[in-house]
Amino acid sequence: MEMTGAQMVIEAMKLEGVDTVFGYPGGAIMNVYDELYKQSDFRHILTRHEQAAVHAAEGYARATGKVGVAFVTSGPGFTNAVTGLATAYMDSIPLVVISGQVPITLIGTDAFQEIDATGISRSCTKHNYLVRSAKELPRILKEAFYLASSGRPGPVHIDIPKDVTAELAKFDYPTHVDLPTYRPTTKGNVRQIKKAAEAICSAKRPVFYLGGGIIHSGSADLVREFVNATQIPAVETLMARGTLRHDDPMLLGMVGMHGTYQANMAMSEADLMIALGPRFDDRVTGKLSEFAKHAKIIHVDIDPSSIGKLVDVDYPIVGDLKEVLEVMIPKVKEHVDPDRYQPWRDILKRYNEIHPLKYEDSEKVIKPQWVIERVGELLGEDAVISTDVGQHQMWTAQFYPFSFPRQFVTSGGLGTMGFGFPAAMGVKRARPDKVSVNFTGDGSILMNIQELVTAVESRLPVINIILNNHYLGMVRQWQTFFYEKRYAETDLSFQPDFVRLAEACGGVGYRVETKDEFDEALKDAVEKGVVAMIDVIVDRNENVLPMVPSGGTLYNMMLEFKD
Amino acid sequence: MKVERRIISVVVQNEHSVLARITGLFAARGYNIETLTVAPIPDSDMSRLTIETRGNVRVIEQIIKQLHKLIPTFKVIEHEEMIEKEMVMMKFPINESLSNIQALCEAYNGGIANVSSQHIITMVADEPKRVRHFIEAAQRFHPVEIVRGGVVAMERE
């Protein structure tokens, strides 16, 4: 069947089962929007900034594992979307982002709203395309969805010149993709898996190092089974939160810069590290030469370049985590004796008794950690939690009782402020059955505040909880610790009235200064199902602890800070 | 870790901006490109790049893995034993001894490529090390211009 390039884009969305596109129209992508107007198979959500469109698509993808889709126009429309692409790239989130481009005849002439989009997105996408003719479009669209979601997932960008969206060509949508240059290894090497299984059974102080790959590969159930069968303690990275239930006795908590004492000590004293889909990020490892000095390392990852990148690995296993675990778990179960690790578990338990994750609650002022725990008590498994970036993000990772994978949506690798609110809109669209909560800070929320309008208009009731300390808190904390309290440009005392700001956009605002007020506000927002802005005035000087200073060693944590 | 020189050949799908993907990768991750040669492979839709690079073992391993990871990459070839050749062209003033220059070029697998009223142009293709020696030896003929071609290489077996 013949159709225009623009029609092909819409058809491909239907065939890929896309139910939501986030985006923002503009000159170069108008043909696509014209076709979008004529269809009713999927919903388009008009954000108020292209960055938010991509973050919303990310929120959708992170909450479901499906490919998130965003449409933007050429030039500034595309450059605004770049932060979203980079955020998704760092966290391996499957996205297809389609941008308009000036007509082929104008490319290279510095035309109005022209930018070398594929040149810019090359370093922050898994792959990208500049479409030369409508003939190529069916293949490229099919490949884009396949590349985004297979192997190590990631964002794919398609740049389509305006004349290509108007061009007629035959539409024959491929049923499968065969790329001779792209064949991800999914089956792990069986001999290597066997050796790893033996190492697990003969270790004395093993620890699971659980990473984001578990979430991407949908293997959390298998990991739970593995941990339960072996009774080996486990640490989670930021991206792996929710893999194990918060009350799993084997869970030592989050690892790394703001990880728990027992988690970081387990990494430091282990004789075997079973790394399932993490990437040995510097926020986890601290100083590399001191990292896991006594441990042999098993590393399972679908991306070979992740293995051995920063740390030498003794048992490298390239493959899809799910497929690898399906082979590895039975092999371990045959020989493992969970009692063998009892002395090790006792040591770690003792560490946790000495230095548990804690904060000092107060009746005079609300502590940010209390707010997170309270939301956990009131909403627990009924909420999917998004965050922005900063202190509130770390407190959420530390204190929220996560119960299932994809319950926590956060920008880990890139650390993008302004991510949370639009992501929480995508979450709400993907999981209407859940309460979509965005923990944010008074700094972060203003970086995509215009999305109040989107959320209200598109009926995406997101509950924003601002942990408002009138500071750019995380930077302020570093200035306190490492810059002798020279608070350069981190005092955010001058702020909008968040309540009235929410109201101006059609949402509901609450200002909260006591615990009772917070309970009332949250209950009211949940009951009414409104776009909410709960502005919680919290202790200005609270710090995220414990902390491994940047470049420090995991076993040398800052546990307290006394002025 | 010891820094070593490596030759890596990459076979890639001939498509829009594939060279930029490869050079961009080296630039973004701070890897070195000492020389780079590219040409299409006859009767195929592939091109072959030969990259001369330097780095320690971990860096070289990452380069190879990262090259593999690029979607248009078909094959990454690196081998302990590569047969390498490099080409160099040199331009000399006409008043230098033509026969001496010719003898030198022949000793290094080359010859005179062109003679004009002002200049002699020579061409030599040999192992990279021998090309370096040739350039050193040719200095006494006061070359006015040197163009090196970058390494091409093949596995021995």
Image: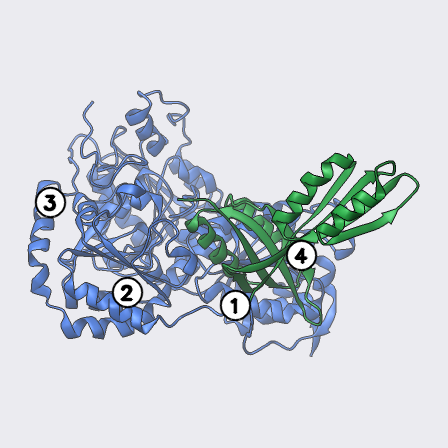
Chain colours: A blue, B green
Q: Do the residues marked 4 and 1 share a common chain? A: no
Asked whether disc 1 touches disc 2, contact meaning CB atoms under 8 Å apart, the reply is: no
- Dot 3 or dot 1: first in sequence order is 1
Residue where numbered disc 1 is placed: A182
Amino acid type indicated by mark 1: Tyr
| The C terminus of chain B - image quarter | bottom right
Residue A21: x and y in percent read 52, 61
Amino acid type indicated by mark 3: Tyr
Residue A45: x and y in percent read 52, 57
- Kindly identify which chain the residue marked by label 1 belongs to: A
Q: Nearer the viewer, residue B155 or A17?
A: B155
Mark identifier at residue B25 = none
Q: Nearer the viewer, residue A84 or A453?
A: A84
- Kindly identify which chain the residue marked by label 3 belongs to: A
Q: Is residue A258 visible?
A: yes
The local secondary structure at tag 4 comes to: strand
Image depth: mark 4 or mark 3 in front: 4
Q: Is residue A431 visible?
A: no
Amino acid type indicated by mark 2: Ala
User: Residue shown at 24%/44% (left/top)?
Assistant: A259
- Kindly identify which chain the residue marked by label 4 belongs to: B
Residue A94: x and y in percent read 46, 61
Q: Tell me: A440 left or right of A166.
A: left
Residue where numbered disc 3 is placed: A351
Mark identifier at residue B38 = 4
Q: CA distance from mark 3 to mark 1?
A: 46 Å
Q: Is residue A447 above or below residue A86?
A: above
The local secondary structure at tag 3 comes to: helix
Q: Do the residues marked 1 and 2 share a common chain? A: yes
Residue where numbered disc 2 is placed: A220
Amino acid type indicated by mark 4: Val
- Kindly identify which chain the residue marked by label 2 belongs to: A
